[in-house]
Amino acid sequence: MTTAAKALTEETDPFCLSPARAAQLLAGAPWRRFAVAGDSLAVGTGDPSPGYANEPWAERVRGVLRRVHPELAYLNTGTIGATAADTLDRQMDEIVAFGPDLLHISCGANDLFRRRPDFGLAEHTARQVLELAAGTGARLTTFTLGRAFDVTTIPDFPQRVRKLNDITLRLAAEYGMVLVDMWDHPLNARPDLLSADRIHFSTSGQAVLASEVVKSLAAVLGPVGSAEGPRVDVPDRPTRDWVYAPDFTG
């Protein structure tokens, strides 16, 4: 006789940090003006998951940072359906005027839905976004897209995602961005990860995304101390096991 696996919750999810633990990891964080720009990944769109708070990843990170600095200012200009060009033309002026010292950029995924994506143009536009972002002096962060992000009506969609991820990796290295690499994260194997649209992470995925952002930022800060205890080591993060082939012509 077999016993059904118990459903995960935020408290039991091995990839989720508790708010207290997350704040402990960022105890030395200097950031007081957090901004997010881009598409629905920036917005944190997703269906509710039982056992998880219905809260997007960025708002979760904001909450952690406000435990460290209660006066933290926050701006999210993310727009569902925004392309890289939309992010550049409709969001970056507001972002620059806000003057962030921590800035997340997620753009380019919607460019994959074009009949023939122009990856050269997408990279050029993303570079323009990042030039403006870097000009703020903020610490920059970004995501790669996960394996689970797939559209079955577009047969070569996984190859498109790899191509976009390759651009993201290259630009992240060039601009010194904190890269939260979700391509091969074990989260992608969860059958209940995606929302009903089969594109966006449910809120269980949003919770894990937030924790991975915190871990990545903590890694930048290094081991930190807090008033409550000794120096804290940053938890290990999953690492990728693929290398994009530069001669891809999909």
Image (cartoon, helix red, strand yellow):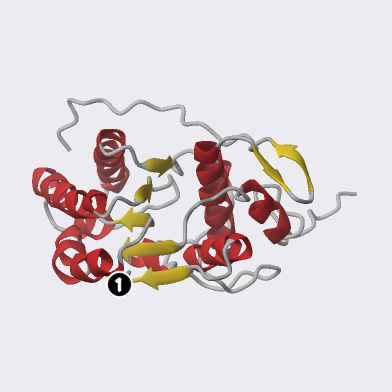
Give the position of the C terminus as an image quadrant.
top left
- The x, y position of residue 80, in whole percent, is 31, 72
Q: Name the residue under label 1.
A: 79
Is 3 placed above or below 65 here? Answer: above
Q: Do we see residue 45 in this rendering?
A: no
Q: In the rendered structure, which amino acid carries the disc numbered 1?
A: Thr
What's the residue at 38%, 45% (across, down)?
Answer: 144
**Figure label count:** 1
Image quadrant where residue 34 sits? bottom left
Name the residue furthest right: 1
**Which residue is located at x 56 percent, y 43 percent?**
218
Q: From the viewer's perspective, is 40 left or right of 208?
A: left
Instruction: Work out whether 202 lies above or below 214.
Output: below
Q: Mark 1 falls on what kind of element? A: loop
- The x, y position of residue 45, in whole percent, is 43, 70
Q: Which residue is drawn at 25% across and 49% down?
A: 134
Choose between 7 and 40: the one closer to the eye: 40
Label 1 CA crowd tier, 10 Å (few <14, some 14–19, many 20+): many
Residue 242 at x, y percent in the picture: 40, 27
**Is residue 106 in view from this perspective?**
yes
Residue 152, x across and y down, in percent: 34, 55
In the image, 156 versus 176, the foreground residue is: 176
Give the camera-side residue of 74 and 205. Answer: 74
